Image: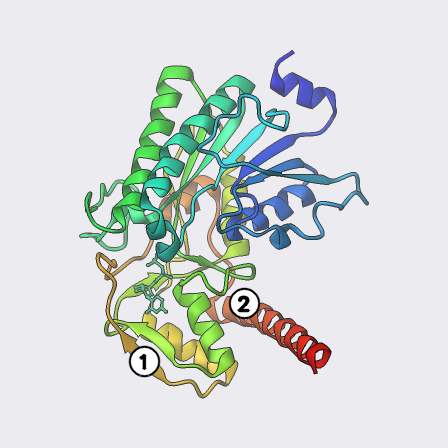
Amino acid sequence: MDGVERSKHKGRRRALVAGGAGFLGAHLCRRLVEEGYEVVALDSLVTGRLTNLSGLMDDTANGHRLRFVRHDVTESFDGASFDPIADIVFNLACCASPIHYQAQPVHTLKTCLEGALNLLQLAHRNRARIFQASTSEVYGEPETHPQKEAYRGAVSTTGPRACYDEGKRCAETLFFDYRREHGVQIKVARIFNTYGPFMREDDGRVVSNLIVQALRGEPMTIYGEGRQTRSFCYVDDLVQGIMRLMETPPGFTGPVNLGNPVEVTVLELAERILALTGSHSRLVRKPMPTDDPTRRCPDISLARTQLGWEPRIPLDEGLRRTIAWFAAQEASRNARAMEVDRDCA
Ligand code: UDP
């Protein structure tokens, strides 16, 4: 009996989410559990956190289940400590923050390539649909604006971002070659900047940095002049886009842009966060990182027509929710610190 039959035999669809304890992965796992999937979340826990999945692992109230397995996708699934059976596979396994993916660039490339290969093999064996979390970084420093899927990108092969950008580009190629050679059902999304609860406060991303700095009254770091743009999508919208993509007929593979087409400068973002937090933090300039793209905004016409999807949550609303989550994290951190002080006194 093959994987699909075995899984269906148990009467429950089984989803395998690689990178399941990361920011995006955890939101996706939550949604899949809500949809009635039995979920296996894989994560190396290099940047993912088990606390992101809290409440899900023991959610048996409705017969829903999530199992966490510590596994680095660069390692083969042969002899894995779990049954690698799935109806649907999601590859979100890779550090997405520049400071983290640049800290171990060789491992980042291996994660993109060997991770994609291992997961494609698994999907092939299971006759499962497989999702690839690709990225707007495949466009590099774009020469066209906004970016359509047909644009082939301008990417440095040698710069500090190349391990991620080129790794993700090559992973897309592997996905399409696997489809051509083995008929695997693939779905590829190019994900633009996404934000929301469960981002790491030490992730170095602009949204998390600026919110945490504003809440703590610390200087808010603006790289370069702050005139570079990004387009920020609230995580619930993004997850909805992924779910819609997975429901498309086999003939639709993507790549499809998933992101919010509302473009803002980093300075505008900082001003919104200042207004929403009521913080008196000042802005400080820091050097612009190498190869940092100056403009980025998705053209989402394809997602609109093929998936019937577009983001619903405006930036201010998404920021309000994200600020509330970070504020709660700060409050419990401070409460813990006070407890330790009391115990030591
Ligand atoms: N950025 C910034 N201050 C920060 C962190 C980031 O001005 O504290 C800038 C960064 O240089 C980039 C933009 O914000 O131009 C988005 O950075 P992020 O790392 O969030 O996303 P990515 O560059 O991967 O799109």
Q: Is residue 331 above or below residue 102?
A: below
Residue positioned most to the front: 344
Residue mark closest to the camera, 1 vs 2: 1
Ligand 1 occupies quarter: bottom left
Q: Amino acid at mark 2?
A: Thr
Q: Amino acid at mark 1?
A: Val
Q: In the image, residue 301 lies at what x, y percent?
A: 36, 47
**Which mark identifies residue 284?**
1
Which residue is tagged 2?
Answer: 322
Q: Residue at x 26, y 66 (%)?
A: 228
Is residue 322 found left or right of 111 in the rendered image? right
Q: Which picture quadrant has residue 176?
A: top left
**Which mark identifies residue 110?**
none
Counting residues from the start of the chain, the first of labels 1 and 2 encountered is 1
What colour scheme governs how the chains and residues are painted in the rendered image of this protein? rainbow
Q: Regarding mark 2 in the picture, which secondary structure is present there?
A: helix
Residue nearest the observer in this picture, 185 or 90: 90
Cβ atoms at labels 1 and 2 below 8 Å apart: no
